[in-house]
Image (tube, rainbow, N blue to C red):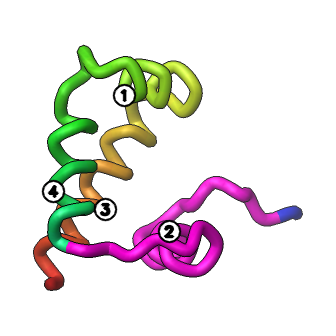
Amino acid sequence: MEKSIIPQNYEEWRHCIIVECGLELTPSYIEERIASLQDEKVFYTKQFIQLYGQQHHKKVLDWFKQARDSL
């Protein structure tokens, strides 16, 4: 079975963000993403939910919160 390119857990998500995407999980970036993901009226949040579903949206939001809590 092939591994999904969509992260399935926090460790895979963190690797994807930091290594694959080359982004830094800074406090300001994390807070911006949490605020945006919590507002389902934001165009990109709506689009994210349409593409990946409500369940994955919740996982990603939780992973950003976990990243914030680990700072």
Q: Is residue 4 left or right of residue 11?
A: right
* Nearest to viewer (mark 3 / mark 1): 1
* Residue at point 36%, 28% (across, down): 45
According to the picture, the residue beneath numbered tag 1 turns out to be 45
* Residue 14 circle label: none
* Nearest to viewer (mark 3 / mark 4): 4
Kind of residue sitting beneath label 1: Thr
Range of magenta residues: 3-26
According to the picture, the residue beneath numbered tag 3 turns out to be 63
Q: Is residue 29 left or right of residue 56?
A: left
Residue 43 lies in the magenta stretch: no
N-term mark: 4 or 2: 2
State how far apart marks 2 and 3 are (Cα): 11 Å
Kind of residue sitting beneath label 4: Glu
* Nearest to viewer (mark 2 / mark 3): 2
State how far apart marks 4 and 1 are (Cα): 15 Å
Residue 32 lies, with reference to residue 26, above or below; the image says above
Q: Secondary structure at mark 2?
A: helix
Kind of residue sitting beneath label 2: Ile
Give residue 4's quadrant in the image. bottom right
N-term mark: 4 or 1: 4
- Rendering coords of residue 65 (x, y %): 18, 61
State how far apart marks 3 and 1 are (Cα): 15 Å
Residue 56 lies, with reference to residue 28, above or below; the image says above
N-term mark: 3 or 1: 1
User: Of 67 and 26, which appears nearest the observer?
Assistant: 26
Asked if the residue at tag 1 contacts the one at tag 4, i.e. Cβ–Cβ closer than 8 Å, the answer is no
* Residue 31 circle label: 4
According to the picture, the residue beneath numbered tag 2 turns out to be 17
